Image: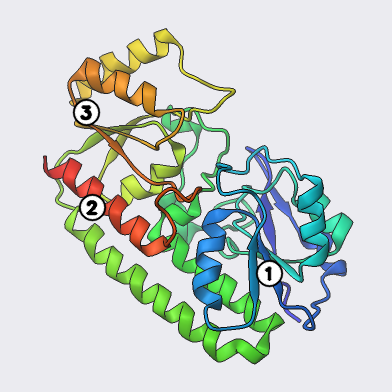
Amino acid sequence: MKKLFKKVVICLTAVFSLAAFSACYKPNTSGQSVLTSFYPVYLITQRITNGTEINVQNMARPQTGCLHDYQLTTLDMRLLSSANVLIINGAGMEHSFIEKAVDETNINVIDSSEGLFDESGINEEHEEHFHSDEDGHDHDHEINSHLWMSLDMVSVQAQNICSGLKEIYPQYSDIIDKNTQLFINDINSLKELEKANQTGNDFNVISFNEAFHYLLEENGAQITAEIEIDENSTPTARQMAQMSDSAKELNVKAVFCADDNGRIFAETIGRELNIPVYVLDPLTYTVSSDDYISAMKNNILTISEAKNK
């Protein structure tokens, strides 16, 4: 049987292979409980399994942001032990716990990032979507693992989830195929909206959330500064001043952030530069992202509004 997982990016310089776990990958078709690592993967999987008897549960709470440093709880371990399969984002997003999860529970794993990376960490077919610290930004990972924020990449993720679930639940193959195609059709409709944002005009922006990198670039933005804000990392007064000076020189037209810890810093820069601040949805919590397509459509329309102001 084809392994449903190949690689998970673990650190800044290496791709961690899950091949070591292949020995314990023995699908159990009797169970119909699917666990997703966190909310974006849950949203996609829910669409793909709609109309089946597969029970999809989300592991990390929706309020949890990205999983770079996530540690498994006792409840998480119980969920992993009772589920038939775990669907992960991959690309290093779950690197802090995936080995423990597989070693201690023998759970089946579907890596939705499969095919996006080669042995060097980046598949040439998708190379334009990635960036490294050479661009002058401060990133925790060589590969930005917020794949679901790219319409091109989320299509690959959906296809990987589809293929993995069909191998485990062949009785639902037709429904899973149909749902996946409908989801990808919706993605293609969103791509038409993105095309309207490719005007060729300069659209320099500042982003206070690394999750928006792909989304902003796909919608014609040039990111002059990208700052990730969390409880352990906030910009200094000097960094904020340097960012402001650089933004003036580069004629930055908009600041983007999520409705999180980065918003106060984004609004500070916006006031200093007298430019608008726009809030985008990273789809990691349930405030507005109860449906992937509608949330992404709102994001694209927000970027379009900023670009045309």
At which x and y percent is residue 86? Answer: 70, 64
Please determine whether, in this image, residue 271 is positioned above or below residue 284: above
Q: Quadrant of residue 206?
A: top left
Label 3 or label 2, whichever lies nearer to me, is 2
At which x and y percent is residue 13? Answer: 64, 39
Find residue 252 and name its label.
Answer: 3
Give the Cα distance between marks 3 and 2: 19 Å
Give the Cα distance between marks 1 and 3: 44 Å
Looking at the image, is mark 3 or mark 2 earlier in the sequence? 3
The crowding category of the residue bearing disc 3, from other C-alpha atoms within 10 Å (few below 14, some 14 to 19, many at least 20), is many
Please determine whether, in this image, residue 161 is positioned above or below residue 138: below
Q: Is residue 116 visible?
A: no
200, 179: nearer the viewer: 179
231, 121: nearer the viewer: 231
The crowding category of the residue bearing disc 2, from other C-alpha atoms within 10 Å (few below 14, some 14 to 19, many at least 20), is some
Under tag 1, what secondary structure? strand
Does residue 20 appear left or right of residue 188 in this picture?
A: right
At which x and y percent is residue 169? Answer: 68, 84
User: The C terminus lies in which quarter of the figure?
Assistant: top left
Amino acid bearing label 3 = Val
At which x and y percent is residue 306? Answer: 19, 41
Q: Which residue is mark 1?
A: 34
Label 1 or label 3, whichever lies nearer to me, is 1
Q: Are marks 1 and 2 in contact (CB under 8 Å)?
A: no
Q: Which residue is mark 2?
A: 301
Under tag 3, what secondary structure? loop
Residue at image position (45%, 68%) is 155
Looking at the image, is mark 1 or mark 2 earlier in the sequence? 1
User: The N terminus lies in which quarter of the figure?
Assistant: bottom right
The crowding category of the residue bearing disc 1, from other C-alpha atoms within 10 Å (few below 14, some 14 to 19, many at least 20), is many
Amino acid bearing label 2 = Leu
Residue at image position (49%, 58%) is 124
